[in-house]
Amino acid sequence: MAGGGMVASSGGTEFEAKITPIVIISCIMAATGGLMFGYDVGVSGGVTSMDDFLKKFFPVVYRKTQADDDSNYCKYDNQGLQLFTSSLYLAGLTATFFASYTTRRLGRRFTMLIAGIFFIIGVVLNTAAQDLAMLIAGRILLGCGVGFANQAVPLFLSEIAPTRIRGGLNILFQLNVTIGILFANIVNYFTAKIDGWGWRLSLGLAGIPALLLTVGALLVVDTPNSLIERGKLAEGKEVLRKIRGTDKIEPEFLELVEASRIAKEVKHPFRNLLMRRNRPQLVIAIALQIFQQCTGINAIMFYAPVLFSTLGFKDNASLYSAVITGAVNVLSTVVSIYVVDKLGRRILLLEAGVTDHSDNLGTAYAVIVVVMICTFVSAFAWSWGPLGWLIPSETFPLETRSAGQSVTVCVNLLFTFVIAQAFLSMLCHFKYGIFLFFSGWVLIMSIFVVFLVPETKNVPIEEMTDRVWKQHWFWKRFMEDETDDGFKKNGHAKVFDPVAQL
Ligand code: BGC
């Protein structure tokens, strides 16, 4: 299994690294954190279209679905129902800031373990829910799990991977997200047929990914970056030797020690994140997440069954279509795993701009609509889906990586929440025009990528500042060392000083 080879990085450091079984297995286990995220994304749409579930928790919506007089577009327009979906994201976007502390102080691995435990308790509450309070409490705990997992897993993958396949290994996270969504769609397809307790089974089967992540977190080693950052130098070196499959790890080890020395000087990571020299990574992380959500992907992922029934499909057919969308999502993500380290990040983001336009629903023909949705989903799945998680996790320097990842997760979940909360009302008011709104974003996103997103493939993770940001036509001005108005030097970094601006 072990493939020999060096990290071929254009003009920079070459670290020796084999593709060892331990790296691959660790990544596969850690990436199951994405499975849970995906399952939660996918399961709610199907569950909220099940009669028994609506009767028990949302009788008002149930009565609406039974009445003939209401427009199809507005049946599900209910704030309580939307809160069921979106409470998870609100919890997650708050929890991720606590997770920033744990990933930094206790490690990536331990943070994944906490996520697994949140997931298990959340699943139990959801499955046994007797009333709305219990149901929402369960969703909130699942949300905390997502906040912790999405914080730790992408960092873990980007750090443990050898540079030349870092993109591919990181995208295992997104692959798991898509498998989770597909799994949820399939489960819903079958449980929808079970009278009375089908929804409980749907919510309960989330226990499988929850257990996988928990066991995975117990078995993997932490990343050398995190071990060294926490002062465990000998252990970090040993792990590095093991995962790289060679004794020639000194250059990479020294680079990690240097990165951790700088990281240790930072006492307040979030304040540090606001420093001028961290502006490029911060802006890109935030923008990528906003753009990722403004593609409108989750309008499809959450509400595919609702959407398809709006388009005139019968209940079963609509879940069936959701399964097709889910499968397209998984397969297209695999494409990304293969090409991301060869073609690079930018190409993938840019070609998606062309394909994404196809989500203009306006036709009466349901089959054409399904095909269009699938084209849209596949374009997302090899670009903005995986890269939204990959790029932020690999571009921050060690000292702000955890804090930066919190902002990434927070913005992602915040915008996911906004779309989840608003979509059914928007669908009700704008009808298919809502998809025109999403298409408009694609142009803005592509322009942003052309000018402001640098290529990060094949650059060792602790060398981004020198090799990427300091070379970029626009962002390099944020990397200059000399003081300028309003900025003062602080150790190796400049600090924005608002007082000096007065
Ligand atoms: C996004 C999720 C989305 C999923 C779809 C992820 O990258 O963050 O919001 O549901 O992709 O596959």
Image (cartoon, rainbow, N blue to C red):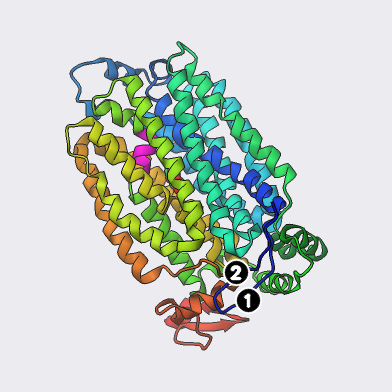
Label 2 with label 1: CB-CB less than 8 Å: yes
Q: Secondary structure at mark 1?
A: loop
299 within the magenta span: yes
Q: Which residue is mark 1?
A: 13
Q: Residue shown at 49%/75% (left/top)?
A: 469
**Quarter of the image where one finds residue 326:** top left
Tell which of 109 and 22 is nearer to you: 22
Coordinates of residue 154 in the picture (x, y in percent): 57, 53
Q: Which residue is mark 2?
A: 460
Q: Is residue 301 above or below residue 437?
A: above
Task: Give the class, few, some or many, for how many residues have Cα within 10 Å of label 2's Cα (few <14, many ≥20).
Answer: many
The amino acid type found where label 2 is placed reads Pro
- Residue 498 appears left or right of 100: left
The amino acid type found where label 1 is placed reads Thr
298 within the magenta span: yes
Q: Residue shown at 65%/33% (left/top)?
A: 211
Coordinates of residue 410 in the picture (x, y in percent): 48, 52
Chain-order first, disc 2 or disc 1: 1
Quarter the C terminus occupies? bottom left
Q: Which residues are magenta?
A: 297-303
In the rendered image, is residue 98 in sight? no
Q: Residue shown at 49%/62% (left/top)?
A: 342
Q: Residue furthest right?
A: 234
Q: Residue 43 shows which numbered tag?
A: none
- Residue 357 appears left or right of 482: left
Q: Secondary structure at mark 2?
A: loop
